[in-house]
Every structure is written in C-alpha cells, then in structure tokens.
C-alpha cells in the first residue's frame, strides 16, 4: 500500500511538472506571437470603433476609426475627418485585443500615405494641416504631394483656390505633419 501511494505521488509530481512546462511554453509562444503584431494590425482590428488618438504636438481626437492604411489612419471626430500619418501618432486609446493581420484584410493591399495625399490633391480638397509641434500649418487647398512634402495653397476655407485668394504657398515636410483635416 505504501508503495502505491509513493508511486502515485511521484506520478502526480511528474504530471504537474509537465503541465507547468507546457503552460510556460504556451505563455512564451503567446509573448512571441504578440511581439510580431504591428500597431496597424491592432488598429485594423478595430475599424468602426470609438477611439481616442493623440498626435505628436498634442492634437487629441475622439471619434470613430474609419480606416487604417499603410502608414496612416483616418478618424472621424464628429463631422470632421482627419488623416493622421502613423509616424505622427503619440497614443491610441480604446483598442481591445482584436488584430487584423494583413493576410486577413480585404482589400489585401492598403494604399500608402502618398496615395491618399495625392487623392486629396486630385479632389482639390480644402484642408487644415497640423504639425507635430502642435502648430497649425495653414488652411487651404493642397497643390501637390511630393515624395517627402506637401504644398498647400493657403487661403481662407470659405474661399476657393483662386489667384487673388491665395495668401502664400506653404511647403510642409511629411516628417513635420501630424494631421490633415478635410473640410466639408
């Protein structure tokens, strides 16, 4: 009888150690998997959710996450829509644990920041530009989107881009850009 109890105790100890070893191994695999998740994948898993995004320079937006692209996110803060370069983000609040891997995303190819900025140029969209230092770079119409900069024809938002209305041409390096607010 004592031998059976001893053997049962040894088996229980070995089984317990094996279970603890599997648990540690699973925890490590989870940590490794999480280390491979990009912030864009986290955000893409929450499109449509209410988030609070703070850009470098302090611009804080609370609204619905509209889209996540390659190097940018779009957020609707009430009636206003903002395009924020990913490099200009300081914090994102309101994300859960959902992740949308690039392989799962539809469409599979996400447009880059340059493509979205060129679309705003093509649409002659009226915008307000914000910089990473918190300053407003100006309001007006985007003239062109270069490889590493934007050119804004600065004019009052209630006016159209016409020669007499343009106060100046403002060049903003993309590295200094925190957000583009598209005006209605």
Image (cartoon, helix red, strand yellow):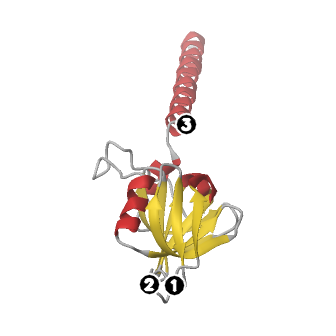
- Which quadrant, please, contains the N terminus? top right
Q: Which residue is mark 2?
A: 160
Which sits earlier in the primary sequence, circle 2 or circle 3? 3
Reply above or below: 81 against 7.
below
Q: Secondary structure at mark 3?
A: helix
Viewer-side label of 2, 3: 2
Does dot 2 land on a helix, a strand or a loop?
A: loop
Q: To which residue does mark 1 refer? A: 165
For marks 2 and 1, the one nearer the N-term is 2
Question: Within 10 Å of the Cα at label 1, are there few (<14), some (14-19), or many (20+) other Cα atoms?
Answer: some
Residue 65 position, x and y percent, is 46, 67
Label 3 CA crowd tier, 10 Å (few <14, some 14–19, many 20+): few
Asked if labels 1 and 2 touch by Cβ distance under 8 angstroms, the answer is yes
From what the image shows, is residue 70 above or below residue 12?
below
- Residue pointed to by mark 3: 35
State which quadrant residue 94 falls in: bottom right
Q: CA distance from mark 3 to mark 1?
A: 51 Å
């Amino acid at each position: 009888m004592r031998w059976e109890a001893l053997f049962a105790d040894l088996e229980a100890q070995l089984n317990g150690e094996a279970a603890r070893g599997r648990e540690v191994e699973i925890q490590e695999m989870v940590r490794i998997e999480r280390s491979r998740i990009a912030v864009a994948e986290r955000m893409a898993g929450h499109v449509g959710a209410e988030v609070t995004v703070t850009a470098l320079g302090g611009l804080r937006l609370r609204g619905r996450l509209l889209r996540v692209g390659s190097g940018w996110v779009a957020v609707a803060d009430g009636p206003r829509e903002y395009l924020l370069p990913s490099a200009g983000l300081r914090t994102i609040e309101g994300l859960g644990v959902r992740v949308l891997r690039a392989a799962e995303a539809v469409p599979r190819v996400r447009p880059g920041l340059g493509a979205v900025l060129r679309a705003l140029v093509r649409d002659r969209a009226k915008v307000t530009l914000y910089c990473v230092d918190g300053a407003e770079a100006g309001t007006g119409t985007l003239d062109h989107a270069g490889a590493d900069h934007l050119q804004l024809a600065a004019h009052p938002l209630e006016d159209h881009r016409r020669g007499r209305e343009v106060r100046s041409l403002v060049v903003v390096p993309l590295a200094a850009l925190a957000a583009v607010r598209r005006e209605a």
